[in-house]
Image (cartoon, rainbow, N blue to C red):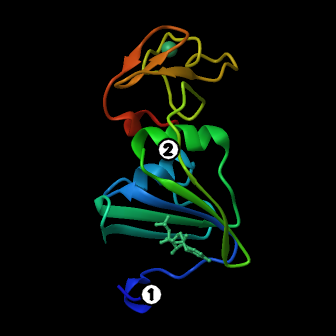
């Protein structure tokens, strides 16, 4: 496919392109980044774009910001094939595949209302990553499916 026909959303000048996100997961990626539409982040999103590798993929471009390690860690759980491209001056200056971490800190909320991380204490949530799902290191509650619905609002 030529560059002309392939280009769906504009290139960005500075920021982060999260590419190879499974089709339909872009809005969950935004939730992980804490973007809910009330802020001023400049964003471009493409959803369900044909992809050789994934069949259908989403792409999220966030201008003027890079991702924290904890954001990348949670992202890897919903988009294991994702590539994170750091763009500066219109050029991709860094590209990495996400890696499945052993633990994720913050971002996800423990579903146990009596967990120390959900009470008023200033304790960040922390989950051990399992084959399938994640386990709260404080109260052992396991989140097996739909991680996206446990992202801190
Ligand atoms: N991109 C962008 N703005 C730029 C440069 C790149 O939005 N200034 C986007 C591209 O559109 C693409 C992603 O960043 O979605 C990665 O760019 P690039 O590495 O040039 O593309 P590919 O080689 O196709 O990437 P890959 O091999 O990871 O599929
Ligand atoms: Zn807990």
Query: Crowdedness of circle 1 by 10 Å Cα count: few (<14), some, many (20+)?
Result: few
**Label located before the other in sequence (2 or 1):** 1
Q: Which mark is residue 17?
A: none
> In the rendered view, does 22 fall on the left or right side of 137?
left
Look at the image and tell me whether residue 116 can be seen: yes
The secondary element bearing badge 2 is classed as helix
Which residue appears farthest toward the right when viewing the image?
89
Is the residue 147 above or below the residue 75 in the image? above
Q: Mark 2 or mark 1, which is nearer to you?
A: 1
Q: Is 134 left, or right, of 123 in this rendering? A: left
Residue 135 at x, y percent in the picture:
45, 17
Q: Along the horizontal axis of the image, is 149 left or right of 55?
A: right
Q: How many circles with numbers are drawn on the protein?
A: 2
- Looking at this view, name the residue that lies furthest to the left: 55
Please tell me in which quadrant of the rendered image residue 48 appears.
Answer: bottom left
Looking at the picture, how far across and down is residue 23, in whole percent? 31, 58
Nearer to the camera, 9 or 43: 9
- The residue labelled by disc 1 is 3
Distance in Å between CA atoms under marks 2 and 1: 28 Å
Q: Which residue is mark 2?
A: 75
Horizontal and vertical percent for residue 107?
Answer: 56, 35
Q: Residue at x 64, y 23 (%)?
A: 124
Circles 2 and 1: CB atoms closer than 8 Å: no
Vertical comparison of 79 with 101: above or below: below
Residue 74 % position (x, y)? 51, 38
The part of the image, by quadrant, that contains residue 119 is top right
Determine which quarter of the picture holds residue 42.
Answer: bottom right
- 62 or 98: which is nearer to us? 98
Inspect this view and state whether residue 40 appears.
no
Respond yes or no on whether mark 2 lies under 8 Å from ligand 1: no
Q: Secondary structure at mark 1?
A: helix
């Amino acid at each position: 496919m030529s560059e002309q026909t392939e280009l769906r959303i504009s290139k960005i000048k500075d920021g982060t392109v999260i590419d190879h996100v499974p089709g339909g997961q872009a809005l969950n990626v935004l939730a992980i980044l804490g973007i809910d539409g009330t802020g001023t982040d400049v964003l471009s999103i493409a959803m369900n774009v044909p992809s050789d590798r994934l069949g259908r993929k989403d792409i999220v471009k966030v201008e003027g910001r890079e991702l924290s390690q904890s954001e990348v860690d949670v992202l890897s759980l919903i988009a294991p094939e994702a590539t994170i491209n750091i763009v500066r001056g219109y050029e991709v200056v860094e590209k990495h595949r996400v890696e499945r971490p052993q633990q994720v800190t913050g971002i996800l909320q423990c579903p146990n209302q009596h967990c120390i991380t959900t009470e008023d204490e200033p304790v960040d949530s922390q989950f051990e990553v399992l084959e399938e799902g994640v386990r709260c290191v404080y109260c052992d509650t396991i989140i097996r499916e739909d991680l996206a619905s446990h992202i801190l609002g």
